[in-house]
Amino acid sequence: MLTRGRFKPWIGRSMLPRVDAPTIFVAPGRTRPAAGRGLHRFANPGRFLRLSGALLPWLAAGGALLTATGLVWGLFFSPADWQQGDAVRIMYVHVPAAWLASAGYFALALCSAIALVWRHPLADLAAAEIGPVGAGFTAICLATGSIWGRPMWGAWWVWDARLTSVLVLFFLYLGHIALVRAFDNPERGYRAGAILALVGVVNLPIIKFSVDWWNTLHQPASISLMGAPTMALSMLWPLPFSAIGCTLVFAALVLARTRAAVMERRIRTLLMATAERAAASEAA
Amino acid sequence: MTHLPYIAASYALAVLIPAAYALAAVARLRTAKRRLAALEPRRRVPQQPVGGMPGR
């Protein structure tokens, strides 16, 4: 029986009542892989909701503040480029979106790997919720790049290696979103989506190195870990603010959506249990 | 050639899309909380008797 007042949304996953959340995902007769035990501490939905509830306001407020600082600084106080003029200010929204498009997909693939290997239930839900947010930021990256390209290159779009590989990333996100929601049984959808996400990881190095491997219209990286930046510091300073701010906003969005998904799963489980009880009483 | 419309369009997209996601997430969270509260009302914490042991 479901215990009223206690929060165990994972029960519906294996339909084994009164089992602690961290152990509920292990098939009967199997032991959980040792490496996953640390992660499964966070599989308890009550603990996740408590931690995420405490973290979410800070992430959202910090992200909004840093993003606003970076964008206002970039828009009004950083110098214009001698060649590009004011169009260089598009960089302060385009670069963070491009970074998050790739980083978001990496996080999606990581969650998918954790879900496939250790059957971590929150990883399934997080992967499903990262997809739409990542697609949104990839769309921002593509759109702002296209808007920048019109005055600078004279074309909204060119079939350049960097642009095309990011477009493929966008389609991978869309494919993941569609695949996860394409099955009546959510578990099958999560599994199929996870496999697609892992296959799609091959696109990330292609995006990163496309400007080095091919002769592209898109400029190579202006900032690298090993060398000095190839742009003036006065133009560079707003960029970390908007990049870190957008990253925090991305994390806050994913966390809020995952919290909602946890609650929705609990609702589904309760409704299914109620329907099963009604069916059993009718049969009796 | 002024670049202002291009810059304005880029910044508008960068603000509006995450804002739409945030509004959708807040609405989804509120709906889920409301439905969950309706399905699973929290147990009332029993009143402690005077002089009783606090906690569990």
Image (cartoon, coloured by chain):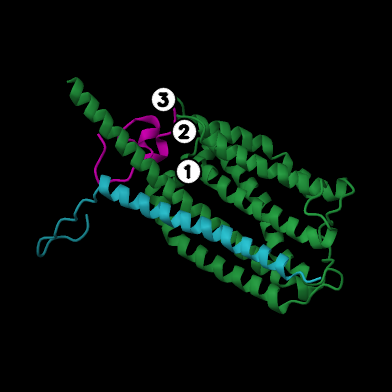
Chain colours: A green, B cyan
Tell me the distance, in whole angstroms, between the alpha carbons under discs 2 and 1.
13 Å
A65 is higher (above) or lower (below) than A184: below
Tell me the amino acid under the disc marked 1.
Leu
Disc 1 secondary structure class: helix
Mark 3 / mark 2, whichever is N-terminal: 3
Q: Quadrant of residue A264?
A: top left
Q: Which mark is residue A248?
A: none
Q: Specify the segment rendered in magenta.
A: A1-27
Residue at numbered disc 1: A122
Residue at numbered disc 3: A28
Residue at numbered disc 2: A186
The answer to whether residue A70 is magenta is no
In percent of width and height, residue A251 lies at: 55, 56
Closest to the camera, between mark 2 and mark 1, is 2
In percent of width and height, residue A222 lies at: 81, 62
Disc 2 secondary structure class: helix
